[in-house]
Image (tube, rainbow, N blue to C red):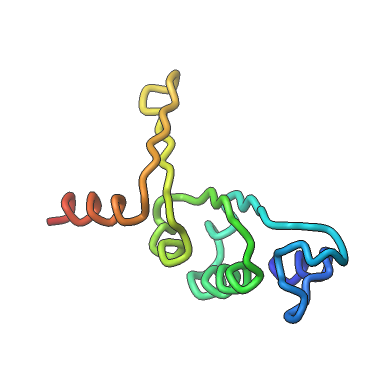
Amino acid sequence: MAAALAFQFGLGAGQGAGRNTGKGRSFWFVVIDEAFGRGSDESARYGLELFQRMKLQLLIVTPLQKIHVIEPFVAHVGFVANTNGDDSQLRNMTIQEYRDERDRRAG
């Protein structure tokens, strides 16, 4: 996916990838909806490293069991829950707040 985006938007290593250099279109934001749910952790990390090198801002929607893969690449997480089926709720926290809460629950 990252390679396809780089090709589509003409982002090369020397072109200030992900930034508008005045020579073309500006592209900064990518939404990834459950892209890592079925793939291996290794391939997900590889893709995230490419996105990071391209300096793209990501919105990643993924099942909770894959959060350990994206943790090193994100600054905030948002949890959406709809426990009774009629009232979705969003909880936003920094990655450090998430880690602290996770550790408290595990300990």
Q: The C terminus lies in which quarter of the figure? A: bottom left
Q: Is residue 89 above or below residue 56?
A: above
Q: Position of residue 81 (x, y in %)?
A: 40, 33
Residue in the picture at 37% in, 22% down: 84
Judge by depth and name the residue closer to the eye, 14 or 66. Answer: 14
Judge by depth and name the residue closer to the eye, 56 or 81. Answer: 56
Residue in the picture at 69% in, 68% down: 2
Residue in the picture at 77% in, 62% down: 20
Please identify the residue farthest to the left as the structure is shown.
107
Please identify the residue farthest to the bottom as the structure is shown.
14
The quarter of the displayed image where residue 47 is located: bottom right
Residue in the picture at 44% in, 18% down: 86
Q: Is residue 80 above or below residue 10?
A: above
User: Total number of numbered labels?
Assistant: 0
| Horizontal side, residue 35 vs residue 87: left or right | right
Q: Position of residue 26 (x, y in %)?
A: 78, 57
Q: Position of residue 17 (x, y in %)?
A: 71, 70
Please identify the residue farthest to the front as the structure is shown.
22
| Horizontal side, residue 37 vs residue 94: left or right | right
Please identify the residue farthest to the top as the structure is shown.
86
Q: The N terminus lies in which quarter of the figure? A: bottom right
